[in-house]
């Protein structure tokens, strides 16, 4: 195995484990919080984190993707990019932090939310530097440092959070712990940068800064729109219903967010493949898009069907018997995974074919649709309306993509053969519907066995086609050869 292949396998394995394990570690804290603080406490905590992540999207300016691309080409300029991108981000973070505190104060939230606003703002400052460090680690294939630091931060925050809950502390203390560990992560990231990349030196290059600023409108616009799209529901729910409703909704949404890791990681892998195929052969590019959709659905459909069928026992085990209102929300919102997986593949295709401007337009339309649906459905259906808005908006997001891709989308969907994996997944739903009295483990095992057998019988997965959507560097590892 070549050194490149070894690095790729190692980094992919580390990143995959991290993406799965890290949210599961957080789930321990969230599950304990739901039992100790109830739906209102969990809602307040998740609302504050939502403010943080949306504000962080603004402060990042979308430059992390650009920094990764540029440093991968010119690794000797890593320190210059870290300094220049961080300087821009810190300037915006200061202004954004003031704005966040003002919004939280003027919005009329309860005392635990208002008194924690400054902690959210304070956490933005280290986070922007952490983000740029991580983008450089990705560029120079040192992903292990991202994983090590993030897991250490999450484990520390979870352990301290569990202790705080045990001692009777509330939301403000938990947010303070979150912010404290952001600063600890900053120190660890800078130490890793100095050890693995280059000596730390603050060198803000004016020409480089101008180059970064020039790319902010598109890269930043896409990131801000996509972040608001995924978080607007929580803001609207917090003002139109109650913090308790936010707690129930975000508890259900947490399982969907964990499952989102799979399409995100998958698209990180296929993006360079699609980029190469677009230049080499338009026909192979379209075929690869279709195959990518099929194989991501092979994974996402059974997860959606399984969680839908087991929503009640899963919510009870993870969040406690008092979180019953989260069950119908989970049954709706988990199906968002299916169109979301397709959306991510098509978005990767747009970037691979140099159509990121189109992706920005679709994101803006999707954001507007999401807000309008929430405004229409929350007053009528409460948290269930919010769940339906989430699902319907991603379906319409997919429709918008198809409209822009109308001259090429039909061959892609024919290649995807969506009905085969959908039929196999429907048998999971049928099995779970017919076996409510069986132990949970038996229901899961039976559904998985039925799905696996149907996949084999329907020949959904074909090795010859799978080669097309694998990065070339993986083929030597798997003993395959790239077809001409």
Image (cartoon, helix red, strand yellow):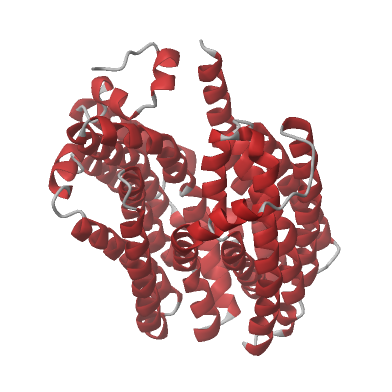
State the quadrant of the C terminus. Answer: top left
Q: Is residue 177 visible?
A: yes
Residue 231 image point, x, y percent = 50, 67
Query: Where 101 sits versus 438, above or below?
Result: below
Residue 17 drawn at (x, y percent): 58, 35
At 31% across and 58% down in the image, what residue appears?
358
Q: Position of residue 135 (x, y in %)?
A: 60, 44
The answer to which quarter of the image holds residue 472 is: top left
In the rendered picture of this protein, how many numbered marks are placed on residues?
0
> Could you say which is closer to the camera, residue 327 or residue 109?
109
User: Is residue 224 left or right of 184 when viewed as pictured?
Assistant: left
Residue 363: horizontal and vertical position, in percent? 37, 63
Lateral position of residue 357 relative to residue 459, left or right: right
Tell me which corner region of the image, top left, top right, bottom left or bottom right, holds residue 279. Answer: top left
- In the image, is residue 133 above or below residue 6? below
Closer to us: 284 or 454: 284
Identity of the residue drawn at 81% across and 50% down: 184
Residue 388 appears in view: no
Quadrant hosting residue 70: top right
Location of residue 462 with respect to 119 vertically, above or below: above
Q: Is 444 located above or below residue 114 in the figure? A: above
Instruction: Indicate left or right for 106 with 356 as reference.
Output: right
Which residue extends farthest right? 167
Q: Is residue 39 left or right of residue 440?
A: right
């Amino acid at each position: 195995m070549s050194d490149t292949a070894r690095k790729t396998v190692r980094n992919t394995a580390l990143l995959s484990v991290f993406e799965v394990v890290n949210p599961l570690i957080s789930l321990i804290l969230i599950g304990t919080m739901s039992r100790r603080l109830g739906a209102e406490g969990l809602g307040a905590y998740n609302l504050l984190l939502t403010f943080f992540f949306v504000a962080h999207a603004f402060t990042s300016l979308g430059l992390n993707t650009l920094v990764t691309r540029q440093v991968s080409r010119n690794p000797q300029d890593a320190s210059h990019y870290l300094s220049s991108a961080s300087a821009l981000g810190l300037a915006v973070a200061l202004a954004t932090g003031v704005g966040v505190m003002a919004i939280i104060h003027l919005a009329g939230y309860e005392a635990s939310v208002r008194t924690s606003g400054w902690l959210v703002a304070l956490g933005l400052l280290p986070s922007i530097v952490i983000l740029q460090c991580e983008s450089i680690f990705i560029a120079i294939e040192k992903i292990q440092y991202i994983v090590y630091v993030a897991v250490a931060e999450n484990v520390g925050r979870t352990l301290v959070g569990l202790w705080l809950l045990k001692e009777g502390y509330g939301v403000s203390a938990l947010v303070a712990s979150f912010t404290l560990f952001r600063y600890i992560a900053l120190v660890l990231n800078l130490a890793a940068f100095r050890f693995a990349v280059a000596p730390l030196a603050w060198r803000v290059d004016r020409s480089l800064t101008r180059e970064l600023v020039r790319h902010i409108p598109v890269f930043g616009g896409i990131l801000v729109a996509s972040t608001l799209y995924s978080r607007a529901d929580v803001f609207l729910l917090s003002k139109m219903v109650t913090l308790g409703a936010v707690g129930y909704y975000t508890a259900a949404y947490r399982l969907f967010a964990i499952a989102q890791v799979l399409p995100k990681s998958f698209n990180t892998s296929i993006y360079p493949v699609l980029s190469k195929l677009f230049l080499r052969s338009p026909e192979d590019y379209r075929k690869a898009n279709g195959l990518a959709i099929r194989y991501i659905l092979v994974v996402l459909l059974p997860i959606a069907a399984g969680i839908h069928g087991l929503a009640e026992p899963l919510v009870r085990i993870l969040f406690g018997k008092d979180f019953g209102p989260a069950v119908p929300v989970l049954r709706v919102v988990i199906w968002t995974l299916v169109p979301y997986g397709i959306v991510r593949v098509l978005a990767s295709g747009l970037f691979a074919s140099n159509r990121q401007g189109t992706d920005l337009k679709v994101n803006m339309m999707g954001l507007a649709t999401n807000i309008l649906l929430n405004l229409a459905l929350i007053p009528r259906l409460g948290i269930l309306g919010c769940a339906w808005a989430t699902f319907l908006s991603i379906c319409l997001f997919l429709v918008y993509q198809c409209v822009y891709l109308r001259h090429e989308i039909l061959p892609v969907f024919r290649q995807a053969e969506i009905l085969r994996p959908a039929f196999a997944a429907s048998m999971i739903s049928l099995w779970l519907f017919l076996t409510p009295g069986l132990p949970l483990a038996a229901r899961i095992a039976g559904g998985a066995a039925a799905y696996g057998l149907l996949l084999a019988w329907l020949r959904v997965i074909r090795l010859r086609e799978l080669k097309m959507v694998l990065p070339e560097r993986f083929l030597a590892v798997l003993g395959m050869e790239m077809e001409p």
